[in-house]
Image (spheres, helix red, strand yellow):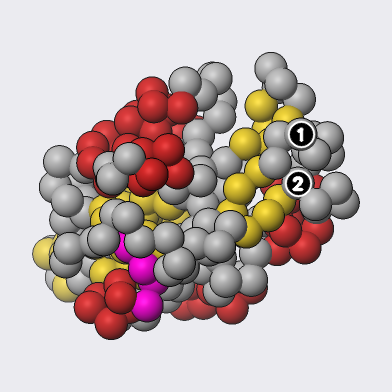
Amino acid sequence: MTTDLTESDADYGFVFDQALCTGCKACQVACIDKHDLPLGVMWRRVAEYSGGSWSRTGATVTPNIFTYYVSVACNHCEDPICVKVCPTTAMTKRDDGTVYVDDDKCVGCRYCEWACPYGAPQFNADTGHMTKCDLCLDYRSEGLQPACVAACPSRALSWGPIEDLREEYGDEDGIAPLPDPSITKPHLVVVPHRDAQQWDHATGHIANPGEI
């Protein structure tokens, strides 16, 4: 898919292909590096989701286990709860559908962080304000890809107008360990791994909680 990088009136979002993701975290590292984020602040995180069991038939033990990855940042939701709970109107949606923090209005109350089911808003202790992914507005204004998308070596990440992404890749957005998508209606499309589980039928666990 080709994306018109100069288009500004579309509601943008991300698409993530789990079958292509190797869990290398290049997207996560590129985001931290590009935005010079302090220790502990991660606008994009890669979760490893694992599960399954072993079955025994006589002397034979057979594994039925799985692992897949979920790379997630702010999903620039259709109904962003962070915007609703912000007492100072610092959380705002741009005309292109992306959600951003107005630093001049933010008081660092962290209501948005607690409300967001994706943990997208991140508190920067150095500034006392909230921060989050803005889908690399500066890069996009220069006709460039967001840093996370450009850094992915397996091309598991892409972005564009969300309706175009849904038309091409489907409308799946509730793969575990992601939450119920009806809460905020994320601008996210997930191309599921063959072992992917739905958010409401999940049996696995996040294997790398200390990394996200």
Q: Position of residue 109 (x, y in %)?
A: 83, 39
- Taking the spot 33% from the left edge, 31% from the top edge, the residue there is 30
Q: Residue furthest right?
A: 87
- Relative to the observer, which residue lies in front, 174 or 146? 146
Q: Which residue is mark 2?
A: 90
Whether residue 136 can be seen here: no
Q: Position of residue 48 (x, y in %)?
A: 36, 48
**Residue indicated by mark 1:** 104
| In the image: residue 42, left or right of residue 3 | right
Q: How many marks?
A: 2
Cα separation, mark 1 vs mark 2, equals 8 Å
Q: Residues within 10 Å of mark 2 (few under 14, many from 20)?
A: many
Q: What's the residue at 73%, 31% (across, down)?
A: 129
Q: Residue at x 70, y 46 (%)?
A: 113
Splitting the image into 4 quarters, where does residue 172 fall? bottom left
Q: Is residue 162 magenta?
A: yes
Residue 117 image position (x, y, % from top left): 62, 59
Does the image show residue 88? Answer: yes
Q: Amino acid at mark 1?
A: Asp
Left or right: where 124 falls relative to 180: right
Q: Is residue 176 magenta?
A: no
The quarter of the picture where the N terminus appears is bottom left
What amino acid type should be assigned to the residue bearing mark 2?
Ala
Residue 63 lies, in percent from the top left, at: 20, 62
> Which residue range is magenta in the image?
159-163
User: Between residues 3 and 208, which one lies in front from this camera angle?
Assistant: 3
- The residue carrying pointer 1 sits among few (fewer than 14), some (14 to 19) or many (20 or more) residues within 10 Å by Cα, namely few
Give me the residue at 39% from left, 33% from top: 31
Mark 1 touches mark 2? (CB < 8 Å): yes
In the image, residue 44 sits, relative to residue 177, either above or below, namely: above
